[in-house]
Image (tube, helix red, strand yellow):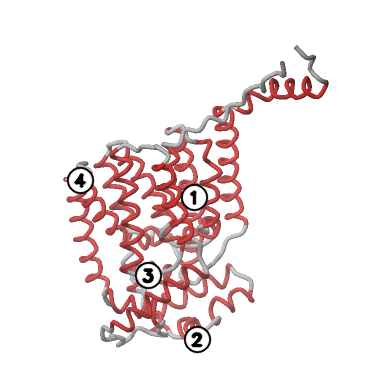
Amino acid sequence: MEAETPFQRLLNAAIKLSAPLGSTKALSVVSGGAFLVFVLVIFALSIVLPVYNYDAVPSVGTALKSQGLSDQTAHKQAWAAFQSKMPESDFDELSRGNEYRMRQSSDADAFASVLPLYSVKFGYVYLLSLAQDAKHMVVTASWVSHLSALLLGLTSFFWMYRTRSLQGAAFVVSLLLMTNFFSLARSIGPDILASALTLIGLYFWLQKRAWFSMALLLVALTLRPDTIIFLFALILVSILFKTEKLPALLAFGAGLAISIWMQKLMGHPGWWTHYYFSTVSIQPSLEGFEPAFSIFAWLKGFGRGVFMSIANFNWAAVFLTLLAGLAVMVKSGLTFSRRQTALITASVLTIGGKFLIFPLPDSRLYLVFLLAILLTCLAGWKPDFSWSNPRKTS
């Protein structure tokens, strides 16, 4: 047997010393720790670097109106509250960045005309209305976003920890970065809170806690009414994969009743007007605006959504990558439980359904379902990262 060269002895010693770090368990510890640091850094930066986005203004205006203030007073106080929080140049962009913003910041009636689009998110409006005045509403709204981002991150960590998939945390970080998680944490709006509650609900559904899951999803529906699409998808998969049907049916029925009631109560202009306003041509005011349905206008809005999703956002690319990765995993022999398969299927149907019904290109609308697909896939991915010593030359 030939004697080991100095290089071989050094290499074998290095492998022996570093072997513990090369184990799957050690990688999970390192990856999990790094993921927690990532979540905490995002949380801290969101507090230090908040963003006062435009949609925050009518959200606060809607909350002020719910307190009984007049259109003029709610308009004045909402804009004044943001002006007091922002540098002059930033507020000028917020209030005069385009024709629509100029009209909204100067015309109380035009501002009031669009508030029903925000008031249907009545859970969020109620949350903001608990604050004393407009300035406190802005502070409350900011902290809701910051804390919701933290909750979403910690829920993702807990999901990976419980399914022993922390070794894949880097993939979750990549997904969150590509779907504008940092921007969501910094901005004001109900979407990040709805995503956090939805993710918790999906986890409990996987754990066969369907009733508790449905309760959380109904709360999320008060923040984002399009959560109803997932509840409908859940009915379909409950039939297809023979999971609990009654919780999904009752939750969908309750969600549909709540949505219809709130739309009528808040004076929402309806799906087509909202679709036209958001995807075809934004209107300075919704007073008297009742466009006739047009298949060409629908196609224009859908085409714009497709183009913007590809050109300005990453969610579509992430979605296709996840589907391709899932296909490869299944082809290589990876299997999922019936419940995991049902959740992945429901998430895919929801993403497609949301975009088909209302083709908004923003990644924030699809983040939680992309995340659910990834976390479910990682739960079934059990790679072996252990290192072994090279064979000695004989």
Amino acid found under the numbered disc labelled 4:
Pro
Considering the numbered disc 1 on the image, is that residue within a helix, a strand or a loop? helix
Residue visible at 25% across and 41% down?
210
Of mark 3 and mark 1, the one earlier in the sequence is 1
Q: Position of residue 115 (x, y in %)?
A: 36, 74
Residue visible at 64% across and 76% down?
89
Is the Cβ of the residue at disc 3 closer than 8 Å to that at disc 1?
A: no
Residue visible at 78% across and 22% down?
10
Distance between the alpha carbons at the discs numbered 4 and 1: 29 Å
Residue visible at 47% across and 54% down?
321
Disc number at residue 99? Answer: 2
Q: Position of residue 269 (x, y in %)?
A: 28, 77
Q: Position of residue 73 (x, y in %)?
A: 42, 77
In-image side of 108 versus 394 (left or right):
left
Q: Which residue is mark 1?
A: 147
Q: Is residue 161 above or below residue 317?
A: above
